[in-house]
Amino acid sequence: MKKYLRNKDRIPAIFGGTSFFNKVIPITEPTISSISALKKKYEEVLRSRMITNSKYVKEFEKNVAEYLGVKYAVAVSSCTSGLMLIIKSLELKGEVILPSFTFHA
């Protein structure tokens, strides 16, 4: 084991080994078309004090469905919740293998 740990090329960068990449690769990069329009919408939502189950959620779901070219879209609080809804709706039985890193699923 000690011989393995001496070779910096074999140790993950997070543990002090050599990084495979020259720059950080972000998990996600949000695309914001108009910061002023986004800010205006955030202010409108926050002033309404209706953050969940409101006309804003329905509007968001409608816009996402149109963008994706599908009939319906459902907003969820996390990708994990979304994956659980999919599993339930498909009535999957037995073992279902999913990635542990579901943030970006």
Image (spheres, rainbow, N blue to C red):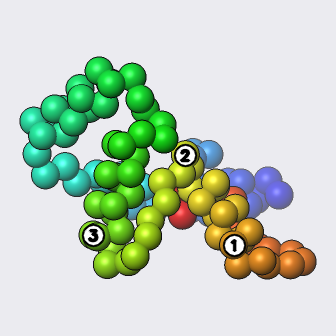
**Disc on the earlier residue, 3 or 1:** 3
Amino acid type assigned to the residue bearing label 3 in the image: Tyr
Residue 40 appears left or right of 49: left
Q: Which residue is mark 1?
A: 89
Name the residue rendered at 29%, 21% in the picture: 47
Does residue 52 appear anywhere in the picture? yes
Q: Residues within 10 Å of mark 2 (few under 14, many from 20)?
A: few
Between marks 2 and 1 in the image, the one whose residue lies nearer the viewer: 1
Front-most of residues 16 and 82: 82
Amino acid type assigned to the residue bearing label 2 in the image: Ser
Front-most of residues 21 and 6: 21
Q: Which residue is mark 2?
A: 77
Which percent across, then down, holds residue 67? Answer: 27, 69
Residue 20 appears left or right of 60: right
Is 49 rendered above or below residue 105?
A: above
Does residue 7 appear anywhere in the picture? no
Q: Which residue is mark 3?
A: 67
Which percent across, then down, holds residue 22? Answer: 33, 57
Name the residue rendered at 49%, 60% in the picture: 74
Front-most of residues 48 and 78: 48
Place residue 100 in its image quadrant.
Answer: bottom right
In whole angstroms, how far apart are the C-alphas of marks 2 and 3? 20 Å
Name the residue rendered at 33%, 74% in the picture: 68
